[in-house]
Image (cartoon, rainbow, N blue to C red):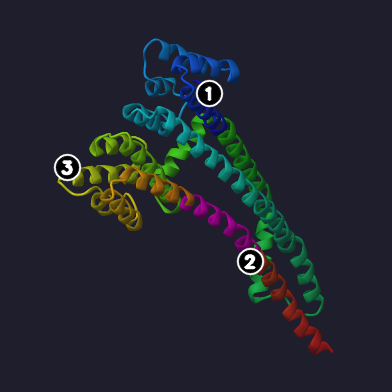
Amino acid sequence: MRKKATQEEIAGQSLELSLLLHAGVGTGEALSLLAEEWGGEVLEVLAERVEAGAALSAALRESGAFPAYVCGLVETGERTGRTEQALAALSRYYEGRMRLGRQLKKAVLYPAVMLGLMLVVIGVLLVKVLPIFDSVYATLGSRLSGAAGGLLALGRWLERSMPALWTILALLAVAAAACAVCEPVRAVLLAVWHRRFGDRGVSRKLNDARLAQALAMGMAGGLPLEETLELCAGLLEGGARARCQECRRRLEGGERLSGALSGSGLLPPRSCRLLELGQRGGAGDRAMEKIAGDLMEEGEEALEAVAGRVEPALVLVCSLLVGLILLSVMLPLMNIMAAIG
């Protein structure tokens, strides 16, 4: 199996290819130049296939090294005579994906490390500190009870289960490493995630932005709307694809584009109103480009907001747990010391 192209490679190669096409260089020759710069077998094979007469989108799809979104958007650009613009749009899209990825790593790494340290602190409190308090209570003629007693029992259970817990942690670490280095395993997990959660929340916003971008490409190139939607359906999965098919049925039934998009749930009502105004003014393609940019920006902001909520949530939960443990032990001890005094 050929190595999948990374987001950095897709962004850089798409940008350079669009610039070469803008300069009048043929697609096959441009791919040969990219192969000399980037290296790798894939670009050389692409250049050979295109020189032999294959379309760029078909060559990309046959290589198996590029995501369906790349192949579909390039095909849309070819069908509309806007291959150069499609490649530039791909470059911007994947540059945004890389930027979001870096932001997510920064936003998640610190909370993840902090969560691990807090779990270690909580484990030490339960396994090592609470038994000491229990011994102190025993010398005073009492025992830990209530919430403190439950936490003490939990700590003893954790101590007995420590070998099994370490084994589970080791297996999880191995599984995480396998996902990081093994493409088939990662692909299966991503496919499962997309089926269950790939069309909700932030993913739904990003799907809408990708759809609007492809629609803008098709509308600017004069491609029939039904055909554009068919191409868009190939870029999406699950519920998003079903919405594309529903929108196409509505269009074939004579409904206006803005109404079909709104009724099928493909785009938010606000975006559909903007599109309708643009169509009335004869600028539907520019309105769709504006919608695509706005939706992508909203998706990125939503993703950043989700990542930004992780850290304070972890701090709050861990602080409450540590405070609960300490209070459940210290309050009874204070009562006993007051009674003795």
Residue on which disc 1 sits? 3
- Queried whether the magenta region covers residue 113, the answer comes back as no
Element at badge 3? helix
Q: Seen in the image, is 235 located left or right of residue 320?
A: left
Q: Is 157 rendered above or below residue 79?
A: below
The answer to which of 162 and 259 lies nearer the viewer is: 259
Q: How many marks?
A: 3
The answer to which of 57 and 128 lies nearer the viewer is: 57
Look at label 3 and name its amino acid: Glu
Element at badge 1? loop
Q: Which residue is pictured at 61% across the width and 47% down the height? A: 103
Residue on which disc 2 sits? 316
Residue on which disc 3 sits? 252
Q: Earlier in the sequence, mark 3 or mark 1?
A: 1
**Cα distance, mark 3 to mark 1?**
41 Å
Residue depth check, mark 2 versus mark 1: number of the one nearer the observer: 1
Q: Seen in the image, is 293 located left or right of residue 316?
A: left
Residue 236 in view here: no
Q: Which residues are magenta?
A: 298-317
**Cα distance, mark 2 to mark 1?**
42 Å
